[in-house]
Amino acid sequence: MRRNAEKLGLDNVNAVLPEDVPEDVRFMSIRSNPPIRVGKNELHAMLLHWLPRLERDAEAWMVVARHLGSDSLQRWLGDSLPQGFQTFRAATNKGFRVLRVRHR
């Protein structure tokens, strides 16, 4: 990631390991193709760790294949995220879903 950022002349990219991100850091946007195949427990733990760190009025966008459980993931997000978070299906195309999570 660092090399790609350097190639593109981007100086506002900070690539770190998850455990190196301070707990008080919040995000205005998260973009992800979540690693569905790591298993449901690991995926859910990952999403519950990062998505609640969205600032108010911020969004996360995730691309998930329909055959890998995008619809059940959308339902789970709606049931599992803290109050103030909304989950929508933003788009569907060629067997993929784009899920949008918004922190109100």
Image: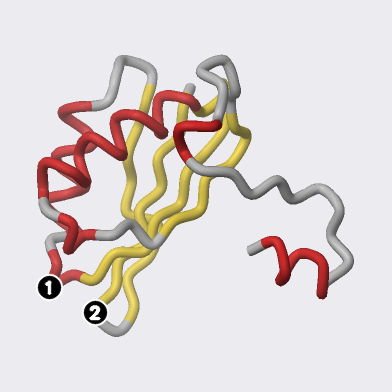
Per the image, label 1 sits on a secondary structure element best described as: helix
Residue 41 at x, y = what percent?
A: 11, 41
Q: Which residue is mark 1?
A: 67
Q: Nearer the viewer, residue 41 or 89?
A: 41
Calculate the distance from the C-alpha at mark 2 to the C-alpha at mark 1. Answer: 7 Å
Q: Is residue 48 above or below residue 60?
A: above
Q: Residue at x 59, y 32 (%)?
A: 27
Q: Nearer the N terminus, badge 2 or badge 1?
A: 1
In the rendered structure, the answer to whether residue 67 lies left or right of residue 24 reads left
Q: How is the image coloured?
A: secondary structure
Residue 51 at x, y = what percent?
A: 40, 33
Q: Is residue 31 above or below residue 52?
A: below
Residue 74 at x, y = what percent?
A: 21, 47
Q: Which mark is drawn over residue 95?
A: 2
Per the image, label 2 sits on a secondary structure element best described as: loop
Q: Residue at x 52, y 39 (%)?
A: 59
